Image: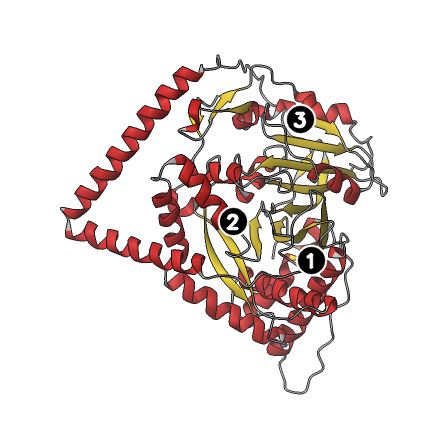
Amino acid sequence: MLPETRLSPLDAAFLAVESPTAHMHVGWAATFRPPQGRSAPTFEELRDHIGARLSRAPRYRQRLKRVPFGISPPYWVDDEGFELARHVVPAASDDLGEAVEASMSEPLPKDRPLWQISVAERLHDRRIGIVGKAHHSMVDGIAAVELASLLLDPGADPDSPAADPWHPRPEPTGAELLIRASVARTWERLRFAAGAVEALSSTKRLARLAGGAGSAARALADAARPARTSTALNAPNSPRRHLGTVARPLAELKLIKTAFGTTINDVLLAACAGAARRHLEARGEEVRPLKAMVPVDMRAAEGGPGVGNRISFMFCDLPCDLGDPAARLHAIREQTASRKRAEQPSGGDALLRLVSQVAYPLHRLASRVVASPRAFNLVVSNIPGPPEPMYMCGCRLDEAYPVVPLADHHALSIGMATIGGGAFFGLYADRETLPDIDRMATALDVELDALLVEAAARRAPAVGNRVRKPGRRAPRHVAPPAAVGAG
C-alpha cells in the first residue's frame, strides 16, 4: 500500500499541459493469441485477472486530491470508492484500430484513479485485443510498460496470485494536505539551501555543481532553440486520435545498428526522419529538419524502478532534408553522440529539478511554454519492454504498440516498444490533422527496408554482390515474439 504522496513537479507538468484537445495519457494497444486446445478467456475472466493483480500496482487504486489554494501539486490518496468495473471495460469495437480510436479520443475522469483498460474479447481475427491508458502524471512510457507487464506472466500457467487484503486509507482533509504541502515545501527549500552551502565548502562538490549547472544551461539553450513549426505537424488539435502501426523483428534493427555502428535509438530516429520526409513531400510541404523531443529514462542513473515519471529529455534535429537514408543515420549518430558527450540528458534532469524550486503556479506556466510547438515538432520515444514471451490468462502476447501523448498543437508522436524479440511502432496522430497517418506508417516501414538494404551492402563479403531487398511487411503482421528471436 502506498501512502499519500505529493505529485512530483514533472508529474504535475503533465496535468498542467492537458486541455480538452490534448489528453495526456500514455498507453498501449496489444493483441493476444488464445491458447490452443482450450477455450479463450471471457471478458469477466480477463477483468477478474486484472483485478487480482492490482496489489502489484498500488497507484492504480489511488486518485488525485487538490491542495487548497493551489499552493502545491495535488496528492495521491486512496480511492475509497474504487470500483474495478469503472476501469476495466468492454472495448467499443471488435476492430483494434476502432477500439484504440474510441478509447484514446476520450479523457480520463479526474475523480477516480487515472487509468482504464478496454478489452475486446474477440477481434475480427479471433485474437484478444487490449487497449490500456494511464495519465502521464501517473506513469511515463517505461513505467507504463512495467505496469502493463504486471498483468502479464512469463509462462502460460502461472501460480494464482496471493489474496489481496487491500483496505483504503481514510482520505486526508483539505486542511491536512495544506499543512503537509507547506511543511514539505519548507523542507525542500532548506535542503536546497543546505546542498548549496555544502557544495561551496568542498572543491569537488563545487566542481560537480558547476558541471551540473553547465549541462543544465546547455539543455536550456537547446530547449529554447526554436523549432520551425510545420503546418502538417503543428496545427491546432482536435480531440480525435488514431494509431498507425508497424511491426518488425528487433533483429533487423540490431543488424542495422551493428552495420552502421550506431544505437537502436539512432535507427529509430533515422527511420522517423525518412518517414517524415516522405510524408511532407506527399503533402506538398517544404521538406526541412524537424526538431524532435526524445525522452530519456533516468532510472539507471537514479537507481531502481519506481512509479511516476523518471525521465529527462534531449532534443534531436531529424535531418528530413537529406535524401539518402544512410546519410540521415550518420547525421543522427553524430548528433546524439555529441549531445551525450555534452551530458544533455543529465542537464535536462538538472533543469527539471531546478524548475521544481519555483512556485507551483509559475511551474505550471513554464510547463506550457516547454510543451509548445515552438519548442519541438514531435516526440519520438524508445520504450524497451520484456525480451521474453509473455502471457495473460494463458494467451500469448502477440503485439504491443505504444501510445505517446500529444500536447496542444502537436499532431504526431512516434513510439517504439521492443517486446519479446519484436519492434512495434505506434504512430499516434490527431485524426483530423493527419487523417493519412497509415500512409506515414507505411513510409516508416519502407525506410526500415531501405536501411536494411544499406546495412546488407555494408556486410556483403565481396564488391559487386547483389543485395536482395527485404520483402515488404504490412503493419500488424509480425511473427509471434519467439519466432522473430530476441535479437
Residue 288, given in percent of the width and then of the height, sits at 59, 70
**Residue nearer the viewer, 138 or 55:** 138
**Residue nearer the viewer, 159 or 79:** 79
For marks 2 and 3, give the CA distance. 29 Å
Residue 62, given in percent of the width and then of the height, sits at 53, 23
**Residue nearer the viewer, 345 or 155:** 345
In the image, 127: left or right of 363?
right
Residue 261, compared with residue 356, is above or below; it is below
Residue 138, given in percent of the width and then of the height, sits at 53, 34
In the image, 469: left or right of 53?
right
Residue 249 visible in this rendered orientation of the protein: yes
Q: Amino acid at mark 2?
A: Ala
In the image, 460: left or right of 353?
right
Q: Amino acid at mark 1?
A: Arg
Residue at left 71%, top 49%? 243
For marks 1 and 3, give the CA distance. 31 Å
Choose top left, top right, bottom left or bottom right for residue 26. top right
Mark 2 — residue? 371
Residue 32 visible in this rendered orientation of the protein: no
Graded by Cα atoms within 10 Å as few (under 14), some (14 to 19) or many (20 or more), the crowding at tag 1 reads many
* Front position among marks 1 and 3: 3
Residue 161, compared with residue 299, is above or below; it is above
Which one is earlier in the sequence, the residue at label 1 or at label 3?
Answer: 3
Mark 3 — residue? 87
